[in-house]
Amino acid sequence: MNNIHKGMNMLTLIKRGILFLSLFLLAIVAQADDVLKFSERYYAKITEDETIQVYERKRPKKPIITVEQIGISVVRHTSNPLIYKDFNFDGKNDLAIVDSQYICHGGSSYQVYLANNKGGFTHNPEFTRLAQEYCGFFNADAKTKTIKVHVEIGWQCWLFETYDVVGGNKLRRIYSLTEDEGFSLNFSEYTIIKGSGKNAKKTIRYTLNKTQAILPPLFQFRLQSAPHKKVALLHDRRAVENFQYATYVDYALLNGKDDRVEYSYELAAKGKLPPSKMYRDHTLTFDAENNSVCFGIGDTNYTVIDQPKRLGVRVKQGKRVTFLAGDPETRIGDLANIHAADNVTPGSCPLK
């Protein structure tokens, strides 16, 4: 009897082992050959070597699209290995298939295939470029029939672009915005291009950098004649030789509604704002006796005056002298420590 029981136990163990091995092999097959059901007409398989193959259900013997992966386990670590959507707004769903995770901080890149008139798909280099060279997959907006992309092109510098579709499979850039927040401590630079080809129009504007929300101006006030405009003396730290820093002061006229820069001594000296000629030495003079700061660029001279009965900016252009009175109630800060900056020297300023 004991031998019979031992034989039955052995047989049970063998059956369990076979069952476990079968389940294990099924798991390997399932892992090695995942099926993506994305359409009634098409489906895709992910093979063991991370290749994605797209099949037509009526003809399952041979794949109509094969995309090999660049890297290890790309497909299984991607939330959207395959995107089935109308990218060119012709009413037919197109295909985007992941091929790597080497763009924009480890983001996924794709190969793009547009639906053709023969019932299949055609690889499109232009749409693929948008899915390879930018951050994340492009945004195809069916309402506006435009495609939007963005990418980081430098430290705190981003590029945003908008395209429309011409002829069903061609892309045309109609808008571009380069947002450079690392342009300087004080300012951000925005380069805008509208239109395409010969009709494209380019504009550049500057705004007060977001850093200024943390680093307030040294001195600031609003103009009486134009309360939405602010006169500000801003400070900046710039790297010099041997990891040393220099402290600079800049004069700026800002639009208080959106902090757009209407004038900046620093930007004018760099040739970014009129006059276009670049100036190497953009220093300011501090007149301690009259509590004023002055500088000149081109044929224009500026004097910022902060006195108990006189607040504002004296502007002399050629022989013409204009005084822009400031509102004392909007005064922020003072000129007490401005002399410590590296581009400020002692001297006298014209007041009349």
Image (cartoon, rainbow, N blue to C red):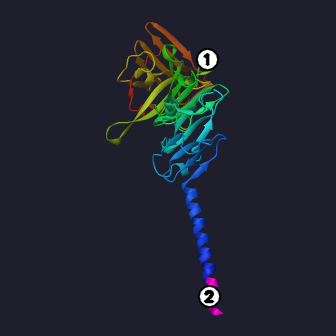
Instruction: Say which residue label 2 marks.
Output: 6
Q: Amino acid at mark 1?
A: Ala
Q: In the image, which disc is placed on residue 48?
A: none
Total numbered circles: 2
- Residue 335 lies, in percent from the top left, at 49, 30
Q: Quadrant of residue 286?
A: top left
Q: Is residue 307 visible?
A: no
On screen, residue 45 versus residue 318, left or right, reads right
Name the main secondary structure of what is drawn in magenta.
helix
- Residue closer to the observer: 103 or 82: 82
In reply to whether residue 8 is colored magenta, the answer given is yes
Q: Residue at x 60, y 24 (%)?
A: 256
- Residue closer to the observer: 266 or 174: 174
Q: Quadrant of the N terminus?
A: bottom right
In reply to whether residue 278 is colored magenta, the answer given is no
Instruction: Say which residue label 1 marks.
Output: 226
Rate crowding at label 2 as few (under 14), some (14 to 19) or many (20 or more) other CA atoms within 10 Å: few
- Residue 291 lies, in percent from the top left, at 48, 25
Q: Quadrant of residue 327?
A: top right
Q: Amino acid at mark 2?
A: Lys
- Residue closer to the observer: 85 or 289: 85
Magenta range: 1-9
Q: Is residue 81 visible?
A: yes
- Residue closer to the observer: 146 or 335: 146
Q: Nearer the viewer, mark 2 or mark 1?
A: 2
Question: Element under label 2?
Answer: helix
- Residue 84 lies, in percent from the top left, at 62, 38
